[in-house]
Image (cartoon, rainbow, N blue to C red):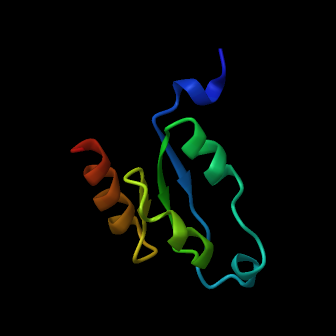
Amino acid sequence: MNLLSRVNLAFNLRIPESSINNTTFPSKIVEYLRHNIHIISSKNEDLESFKFYNSVFIMEKYNINEIIKLIVEYITL
């Protein structure tokens, strides 16, 4: 059985101020979406185009309280 078929929620957490965010795209996002996996992600310019998916939760702030808030949002879908 494919591991991704058993996953309901994935995280893409990156330090927003990191310069690497300007030059790389988290390619796993596409794979997660293909498997209908919900995603909690730190903010990234490239991910703005995925906001229309109901399964992508983008963190407005990079802290634990924001992660908890988005997990609760996911649980209450």
Q: Residue at x 24, y 44 (%)?
A: 77
Q: Residue at x 78, y 78 (%)?
A: 23
Looking at the rendered image, the quarter that the N terminus falls into is top right
Q: Is residue 48 left or right of residue 26?
A: left
Q: Is residue 38 left or right of residue 20?
A: left
Task: Identify which residue, 44 or 68, lies in the foreground.
Answer: 44
- Point out residue 73 in the picture as x, y percentages from the top left corner: 26, 53
Q: Residue at x 34, y 51 (%)?
A: 71
Please state the total of marks drawn on the protein image.
0
Q: Is residue 50 above or below residue 71?
A: below
Q: Is residue 74 above or below residue 66?
A: above
Task: Identify which residue, 72 or 56, lies in the foreground.
Answer: 56
Task: Identify which residue, 33 or 10, lies in the foreground.
Answer: 33
Q: Is residue 17 left or right of residue 23?
A: left
Residue 69, quarter of the rendered image? bottom left
Q: Is residue 15 above or below residue 1?
A: below
Farthest residue toward the left? 76
Farthest residue toward the top? 1
- Point out residue 62 in the picture as x, y percentages from the top left corner: 46, 74
Task: Identify which residue, 24 or 66, lies in the foreground.
Answer: 24
Q: Is residue 61 above or below residue 31?
A: below
Q: Residue at x 45, y 35 (%)?
A: 8
- Point out residue 50 in the picture as x, y percentages from the top left corner: 51, 63
- Point out residue 19 in the picture as x, y percentages from the top left corner: 73, 84
